Structures are given as structure tokens and as C-alpha cells.
Image (spheres, rainbow, N blue to C red):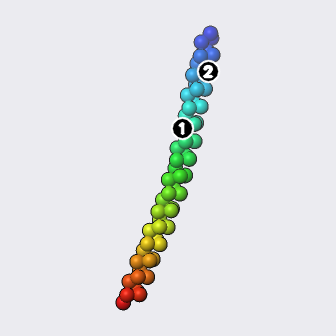
Amino acid sequence: MKNFWYLFSAYTIIWTALWAYVVYLSQANRALKQDIEALRAQLDNAIAANDASKKGSV
């Protein structure tokens, strides 16, 4: 039972690191979703502008 403290410390460090990594991935995923939505909006605007320019020139 002398080594129980080391085992507990190791598990605590591992679980804390795992939790921090999951939080990091969650934030990165949220940022990527925002970037994708911004790109979709830009693409929709570009398509709408292209369609409008085609209708105006016909």
C-alpha cells in the first residue's frame, strides 16, 4: 500500500491531461464549425452575386 499514492497521482495526472485534451478538441471543433459557416455564407453571397450579374446581363 506504500505505492498507492504514486498510482493515485499517476491516474490523476492522466485523467486531467485527457480532460484538458477533450476540452481543447471541443474548442477547436467549435472554431472549425464557425469557419465553415462563414465560408458557406461567403459562398452563398458569391453565388447570389453571380446569379444577379447573369440576370442583369441577359
| Quadrant for the C terminus in the image | bottom left
Between 26 and 41, which is closer to the camera in this rendering? 41
Numbered circles on residues, count:
2
Which residue appears at 52% of the width and 44% of the height? Answer: 25
Measured along the vertical axis of the image, is residue 37 above or below residue 10? below
- Location of residue 31 in the rendering, given as x and y in whole percent from the top left corner: 53, 52
Between 56 and 8, which is closer to the camera in this rendering? 56
SS category of the residue bearing label 1: helix
Query: Please, what is the three-letter code of the amino acid marked with disc 1?
Result: Tyr
Direction left: furthest residue: 58
Determine whether label 2 and label 1 are within 8 Å by CB. Answer: no
Which residue appears at 61% of the width and 15% of the height? Answer: 4
The numbered dot on residue 8 is 2
- Residue 46, image quadrant: bottom left
Between 13 and 47, which is closer to the camera in this rendering? 47
Callout in the foreground (2, 1): 1
- Location of residue 10 in the rendering, given as x and y in whole percent from the top left corner: 57, 22
Query: Please, what is the three-letter code of the amino acid marked with disc 2?
Result: Phe
- Location of residue 29 in the rendering, given as x and y in whole percent from the top left corner: 52, 50
Q: CA distance from mark 2 to mark 1?
A: 20 Å
Left or right: where 5 falls relative to 24: right
**Mark 1 burial class by Cα count in 10 Å: few <14, some 14-19, many 20+:** few
| Quadrant for the N terminus in the image | top right
Direction bottom: furthest residue: 58
Question: Which is nearer the N-term, disc 2 or disc 1?
Answer: 2
The numbered dot on residue 6 is none
SS category of the residue bearing label 2: helix
Measured along the vertical axis of the image, is residue 26 above or below residue 51? above
Left or right: where 34 falls relative to 50: right
* Residue under label 1: 21
**Mark 2 burial class by Cα count in 10 Å: few <14, some 14-19, many 20+:** few
